[in-house]
Amino acid sequence: MPDIITINNHEVGLGEHEKINLNIARLPTYTEIDLPVLIYRAKEDGPVLLLTGGLHGDEINGVETIRRMIEEKSIIPQRGSVIAVPIVNIYGFIQNVRGVPDGKDINRSFPGTKRGSLARLLAHTIMNEIIPHIDCGIDLHTGGASRANYPQIRCSFNSERAKELAHVFNAPVTLNSSLISKSFRNAAHKKGKEIIVYETGESMRFDEKGIEEGIRGIQRIMEYLGMNDEGPEQQPSKTYKKSTWVRTHNSGLFTPNIALGDELDRKELLGWVKDPYGKLNAKITAPKSGMVIGLNNCPVVNKGDALIHFAFN
Ligand SMILES: [Zn+2]
């Protein structure tokens, strides 16, 4: 990396810590909304790691993970630089919603355009102002709607570099996940920058175990990249090549018989869907031998709804 990192015409030198506001677009009220970007540069040069949270505005575990690292000063590397965007979707964050005010998903709007709608404009700004500076990144997410995720790293096993970073992060679960068109991960990959996705917990709820796992994973990556001399110990973890959502064939009330992280054999009981009037009693069973990595916490379900995210090999 050059001695100077320039973001939005703002120069940040070695040993400097800065907060830069990227102007995206103003609200209909004429209120200007800035996207705060934090840059922590060590005196000694080295790799540049990107940390992003809140790409979906209601997914707050990543926001809290980065906030704690700032508070504990563990975000400051011994060598190289950390660029952190704690809340990418500032518009969704203030309203507790996933997308931007027009409902669009930023994670399906990459690489974006300068003249596009808000989601595409945000994507374009990140791709042009941030991505050129980084070596790799960790994008922190949380389960959508009322679905909770077991702490897991997702990356495409087709990329050796991404796979390596995922294993270094050492979350309880590492899951192969194909690159999705128009996603942040895919757009960065096309620029030769690998971003791995960390998922934990449920939207609008803190997941303490997942936040702590996230901090430890980021610190392992910083050690691996040579940004810090030491990182947390490695721990036992599971790697899965595939996953599927187990859906209900019936509408009714869902009662799980399992918890996140449970490992089951094929046909073992996952839970029941029963109707409120005493007639229906449908058993939900494991489609394969594997692990429960996502769970729908809303008991009221309609035919076809996703109940359990199940990982297997
Ligand atoms: Zn998300």
Image: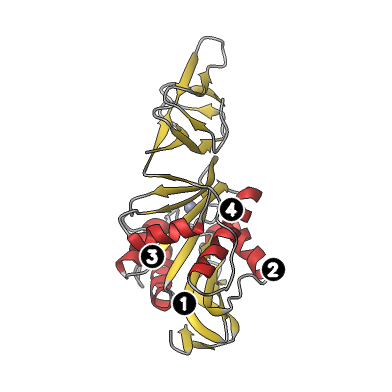
Whether ligand 1 has any atom under 8 Å from the Cβ at mark 2 is answered as: no
Tell me the amino acid under the disc marked 1: Pro
Q: Which residue is mark 1?
A: 47
Q: Residue furthest right?
A: 71
Lower sequence index among marks 1 and 2: 1
**Image point (33%, 65%), residue name:** 189
Quadrant of the rendered image containing residue 212: bottom right
Left or right: where does residue 107 sit relative to residue 200?
A: left
Position of residue 249 measured from the top left corner of the image (x, y, whole percent): 41, 22
The answer to whether the residues at label 4 and label 2 have Cβ atoms under 8 Å apart is no
Lower sequence index among marks 4 and 2: 2
Tell me the amino acid under the disc marked 4: Asn
Q: Eyeballing the image, is 190 above or below 298?
A: below
The CA distance from mark 1 to mark 4 is 34 Å
Q: Which residue is mark 2?
A: 72
Q: Nearer the viewer, mark 3 or mark 1?
A: 1
Q: Which residue is mark 4?
A: 96
Between 33 and 238, the residue placed more toward the observer is: 238
Whether ligand 1 has any atom under 8 Å from the Cβ at mark 1 is answered as: no
Position of residue 75 measured from the top left corner of the image (x, y, whole percent): 61, 71
The CA distance from mark 4 to mark 2 is 26 Å
Q: Which residue is mark 3?
A: 194
Q: Residue furthest top?
A: 279
User: Element at badge 2?
Assistant: loop
Q: Nearer the viewer, mark 3 or mark 4?
A: 3
- Is residue 206 visible to us here? no
Q: Eyeballing the image, is 79 above or below 268?
A: below
Tell me the amino acid under the disc marked 2: Glu
Where the N terminus falls, by quadrant? bottom left
Tell me the amino acid under the disc marked 3: Glu
Q: Eyeballing the image, is 266 above or below 212?
A: above
